[in-house]
């Protein structure tokens, strides 16, 4: 029963992680291309930001499926399910950093 609860929690966290990654992409795209107010800080993501939105978005979705699939695979292969839940929690926590940065530049943009 505990494994089912851990799997359920992991799936919810991975959905949250995926959602945060998509929100990050969309807000970054808006900040760069529509408002001309920010630049992409991650050198690995600059390629996505140079693409048109409707090409970059599906690629970003494919890109985020990699860690989600990897975590689900790790969850199914390991005996220590709690460790995978802890790793996914960490990934979600890290993904809040760009979200807070977006909140900051949006605040600055509209109060400028």
Image (cartoon, grey):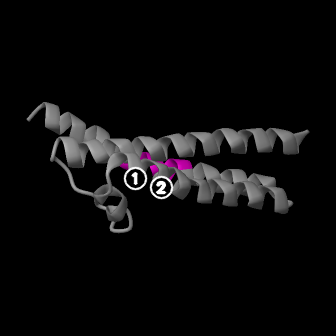
Q: Which mark is residue 56?
A: 1
Please tell me how crowded label 1 is: few (under 14), some (14-19), or many (20+) other residues with Cα within 10 Å. Answer: some
Q: Residue furthest bottom?
A: 43
Q: Regarding mark 2 in the picture, which secondary structure is present there?
A: helix
Q: Magenta stretch mostly in which secondary structure?
A: helix
Look at 70% across and 42% down and name the residue there.
11
Say whether residue 94 is magenta: yes
Residue 96 in magenta stretch: yes
Residue 15 appears anywhere in the view:
yes
Q: CA distance from mark 1 to mark 2?
A: 5 Å
Looking at the image, the residue that sits furthest to the top is 110
Q: How many marks?
A: 2
| Mark 1 and mark 2 residues within 8 Å of each other at the beta carbon | yes
- The answer to whether residue 10 is left or right of residue 52 is right
**Where is residue 83, by image quadrant?**
bottom right
Mark on residue 59? 2
Q: Nearer the viewer, residue 109 or 49?
A: 49
Residue at 75% from the left image edge and 61% from the top image edge: 74
Q: Which residues are magenta?
A: 92-98
Figure quadrant of residue 23:
top left
Image quadrant occupied by the C terminus: top left
Q: Report the residue at 60% width, 59% height from top.
A: 66
Of residues 28 and 92, which is closer to you in this image? 28
Q: Could you say where residue 98 lies in the image, as x and y percent from the top left?
A: 37, 49
**Relative side of 109 to 68, left or right:** left
**Looking at the rendering, in which quadrant would you find the N terminus?**
top right
């Amino acid at each position: 029963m505990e494994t089912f609860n851990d799997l359920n929690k992991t799936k919810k966290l991975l959905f949250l992680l995926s959602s945060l990654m998509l929100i990050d992409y969309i807000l970054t795209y808006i900040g760069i291309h529509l408002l001309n107010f920010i630049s992409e800080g991650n050198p690995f993501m600059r390629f996505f930001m140079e693409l048109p939105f409707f090409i970059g978005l599906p690629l970003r979705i494919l890109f985020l499926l990699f860690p989600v699939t990897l975590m689900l695979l790790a969850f199914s292969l390991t005996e220590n399910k709690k460790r995978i839940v802890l790793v996914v929690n960490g990934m979600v926590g890290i993904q809040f950093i760009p979200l807070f940065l977006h909140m900051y530049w949006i605040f600055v943009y509209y109060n400028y």
